[in-house]
Image: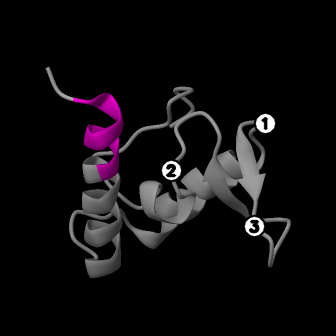
Amino acid sequence: MGCRHCGGVVNGTLGITQSLLRVRVLSQGAIKQRLEICRTCDQSVPCKHNKRQACKCIACGCWLKHKASLRRESCPKNKW
């Protein structure tokens, strides 16, 4: 049985790397649509530099810019 926290760290690192390298990512339109849903969600934390933009999800702890771009990811609240 593995540590759920460590698995989350590894999965998160893999996701951010894939996002930065543009591997397995969605179209810009689909990413924008996901981020707009996140922006209006009560589980998102606004960015410090732009309060109208969602930066982090409280429900899963992910950085939304990266999570929303990955094809394999989904919203923990089933909003996308």
Q: Are marks 2 and 3 in contact (CB under 8 Å)?
A: no
* Image position of 14 (left or right of 52): left
Quick check: 22 above or below 29? Answer: below
Q: Nearer the viewer, residue 3 or 14?
A: 3
- Which of the colour schemes (rainbow, by chain, secondary structure, one colour) is used? one colour
Mark 1 residue type: Asp
In the rendering, at what x and y percent does residue 61 appear?
54, 44
Give the residue at x 57% y 63%. 32
Q: Are marks 1 and 2 in contact (CB under 8 Å)?
A: no
Tell which circle, 3 or 1, labels the residue nearer the N-terminal end: 1
56 horizontally vs 62: left or right: right
Q: How many labels does the image show?
A: 3
Query: Which amino acid, mark 3?
Result: Cys
The residue shown at (84%, 65%) is 52
Viewer-side label of 1, 2: 2
**Labels 1 and 2: the sequence-earlier one:** 1
- Disc 1 marks which residue? 42
Q: Relative to the observer, which residue lies in front, 33 or 63?
A: 63
The disc at residue 68 is: none
- Locate residue 48, reporting x and y percent: 80, 71
Q: Give the range drawn in magenta.
A: 3-9
Quarter of the image where one finds residue 42: top right
Whether residue 51 is in magenta: the answer is: no
Residues at marks 3 and 1, CA–CA distance in whole angstroms: 14 Å
| Disc 1 to disc 2, C-alpha distance | 15 Å
Where residue 62 is drawn, which disc sits there? 2
Amino acid type at image mark 2: Cys
Q: Earlier in the sequence, mark 2 or mark 3?
A: 3
Q: In this view, does 36 lie to the left or right of 28?
A: right
Q: Mark 3 points at which residue?
A: 47
